[in-house]
Image (cartoon, rainbow, N blue to C red):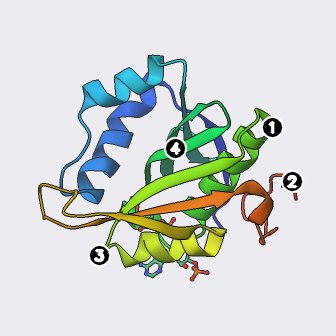
């Protein structure tokens, strides 16, 4: 069974992160965008890597900003060969707990209207639709669904990542 840990993203993860990014999104982030996040004080960047073997393999990643109790999830993807194993779920749970400990209360993200996998994932964590940005994505013309979660509304305590989770 594949087991993984979550740790801070480093520059030497970027090659693999970019490969996942290119496979995952119609308009992928550039290397410059990732480098910017790695140096921004308000940005938090984490990768999931296998425990023990092939520690350098990147299974997935999450990037979020945090300011004054608000947490914005900016980017999240799982390597296509490792989908449906709970990796993205554990990355989000990790981000929620990490930011809660630093004062995060309100969590916000945007997702393409047609991205059913991501919509299901966010609903599973406890996010609920909050608004729509019409034709927000210029590459496909899709609307963005804005979703939000107040930490106190969390209903799930499953610890797919083996991390302790606050109530
Ligand atoms: C969306 C994505 C991050 C999910 O990653 P993942 O590691 O496979 O997700 P998990 O295994 O943690 O799945 C957790 C839940 O998400 C939902 N989900 C994940 N993939 C799904 C799919 N293909 N179809 C329907 N629901 C899906 C399910 O509710 C799942 O729970 P379940 O397995 O108990 O049914 C991944 O498909 C991905 O990288 N997609 C491309 C990038 C992307 O869309 N990122 C989000 C941008 S907003």
- Which of the two discs, 2 and 3, labels the residue nearer the N terminus? 3
Left or right of 137? Residue 100 is right
Question: Disc 1 and disc 3: Cα gap in Å?
Answer: 33 Å
Disc 4 packing (10 Å; few <14; some 14–19; many ≥20):
some
Q: Which residue is mark 2?
A: 166
Residue 114 is marked as 3
Question: Disc 4 and disc 2: Cα gap in Å?
Answer: 19 Å
Give the image location of residue 38, x and y in percent: 46, 23
Disc 1 packing (10 Å; few <14; some 14–19; many ≥20):
few
In the image shown, does 144 or 79 lie closer to the viewer? Answer: 144
- Which of the two discs, 3 and 4, labels the residue nearer the N terminus? 4
The kind of secondary structure element at disc 3 is loop
Whether ligand 1 has any atom under 8 Å from the Cβ at mark 2 is answered as: no
Q: Which residue does the image show at 53% across and 71% down from the upper left? A: 121
In the rendered image, is residue 39 in sight? yes
The kind of secondary structure element at disc 1 is helix
Q: Quadrant of the N terminus?
A: bottom right
Whether ligand 1 has any atom under 8 Å from the Cβ at mark 3 is answered as: no
Q: Which residue is mark 1?
A: 101
Q: Which residue is mark 4?
A: 72
Disc 3 packing (10 Å; few <14; some 14–19; many ≥20):
few
Q: Which residue does the image show at 72% across and 58% down from the upper left? A: 161
- Which of the two discs, 1 and 2, labels the residue nearer the N terminus? 1
Question: Disc 3 and disc 4: Cα gap in Å?
Answer: 20 Å
């Amino acid at each position: 069974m594949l087991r993984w840990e979550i740790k801070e993203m480093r520059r030497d993860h970027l090659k693999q992160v970019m490969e996942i990014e290119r496979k995952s999104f119609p308009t992928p982030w550039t290397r410059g965008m990732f480098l910017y996040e790695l140096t921004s004080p308000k940005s938090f960047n984490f990768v999931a890597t296998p425990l023990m073997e092939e520690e350098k393999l990147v299974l997935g990643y999450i990037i979020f900003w945090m300011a004054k109790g608000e947490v914005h999830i900016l980017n999240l993807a799982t390597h296509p060969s490792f989908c449906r194993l709970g990796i993205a779920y554990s990355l989000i749970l990790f981000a929620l707990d990490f930011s809660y400990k630093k004062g995060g209360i309100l969590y916000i993200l945007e997702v393409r209207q047609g991205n059913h996998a991501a919509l299901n994932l966010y609903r599973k964590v406890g996010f609920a639709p909050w608004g729509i940005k019409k034709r927000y994505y210029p590459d496909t013309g899709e609307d963005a669904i804005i979703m939000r979660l107040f930490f106190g509304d969390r209903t799930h305590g499953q610890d797919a990542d083996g991390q302790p989770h606050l109530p």
